[in-house]
Image (cartoon, rainbow, N blue to C red):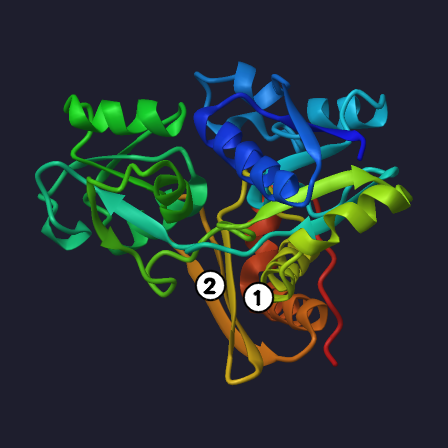
Amino acid sequence: MARLRIGSRGSQLALWQANHISALLRQKGHEVEIEVIRTTGDRITEVALAQVGTKGMFTKEIEDALAEGRVDLAVHSLKDLPTELPPGFELVAITRRVNPRDVFLSVKYESISSLPKAARVGTSSLRRQAQLKAARPDLVIHALRGNVDTRVRKLEEGEYDAIILAAAGLTRLGKTQLVKEVLSEDFMCPAAGQGALGIEIRAGDEEMREDLAFLDDPAARASTTCERALLNRLGGGCQVPIGAFAEARDGTLHLTAIVARPDGSTILRERQSGNDPVALGERVADTLLQRGAIRILEQVYGIEVVAPQQP
């Protein structure tokens, strides 16, 4: 078998993910090597992601390497991958998903409800910030960038009273010792695709598609496709707080989604069920737009958004 070259970011979590896929490929008899690629998002570390507003900021340089043939496949955190891939690429596999929820970490406090007034909470996610402010407007939200180790270290050193991170990354890295509370999707709706890995290849690469087909998890594919369909319909990026959480129960897909103002003053929440992942995601997005999300999007993006037609 030919040697497979994986393109990956160089963070500890990204390398864990790339090595995880490498191990699965080696079990199938492949030789694998990992090429570390520095992305725009890796270079911009002092600015909140919402202020950068660049789609594909964690993926473009890896896709460039893929297009040039320097790597054969790319391993991404699915939540970092834009909902519309550039021409010439395809999402060949979505791996089995680990817990997609967010978690509360603290040295001193056991839960968000136990935080004192004006407690310092670290997050650079507008989605998390908006939902925190809606529940606890007295909290002081501070920007928090850096890899998982850096964020946890800043918490341990007392820069923050608490921080909010994704459960998946902490679990993968074995950094769960300061997790005090797993946040339900009703309190903190996760990011679309959180907890899953997306495997990207050059479009039309039949051999690679066959080699990687075993990595695709049908349940993760259905739930994340639903979430990403909603995000795509809303045109969402880092600048708008949008959350999406889909899961299958009793053979039916259930989707919870939110669109919020960045200051948490308005949170629109919608829950619906269905069997077609794309149709469900788009239907929930249209309902949110009709309920007022259109005005939030227009204010944030400064452009006119076309409202969906009533059925």
In the image, what residue type sits under mark 2?
Leu
Image marks 2 and 1: residues in contact by CB distance under 8 Å: yes
Q: Could you say which is closer to the camera, residue 90 or residue 71? A: 71
Image side of residue 277 versus residue 131, left or right: right
Residue 105 vs 145, above or below: the answer is below
Residue 126, given in percent of the width and then of the height, sits at 44, 41
Q: Nearer the viewer, residue 241 or 157?
A: 157
Q: Is residue 106 above or below residue 310?
A: above
In this picture, is 3 found above or below 233?
A: above
Residue 160 percent coordinates (x, y): 20, 29
Marks 2 and 1, the one that precedes in the sequence? 2
Q: Quadrant of residue 68?
A: top right
- For the point 20% across and 40% down, which residue is it? 177
Residue 231 is situated, as x and y percent measured from the top left of the image, at 63, 54
Relative to the observer, which residue lies in front, 198 or 27? 27
Q: Position of residue 303 (x, y in %)?
A: 69, 43
Q: Is residue 4 left or right of residue 268?
A: right
Residue position marked by numbered label 1 in the rendering: 288
Q: Quadrant of the C terminus?
A: bottom right
Identify which amino acid the numbered label 1 is placed on: Leu
Q: Is residue 150 left or right of residue 237?
A: left
User: What is the secondary structure assignment of the residue under circle 1?
Assistant: helix
The structure residue drawn at horizontal position 57% and vertical position 33%, both measured from the top left corner, is 18
User: How dense is the environment of label 1, judged by Cα within 10 Å: few (below 14), some, or many (20 and up)?
Assistant: many
The N terminus, quarter of image:
top right
For disc 2, the marked residue is: 268
Q: Is residue 136 left or right of residue 14?
A: left
Q: Give the structural element (helix, strand or loop) at label 2.
A: strand
What residue is drawn where x is 14% and y is 24%?
Answer: 158
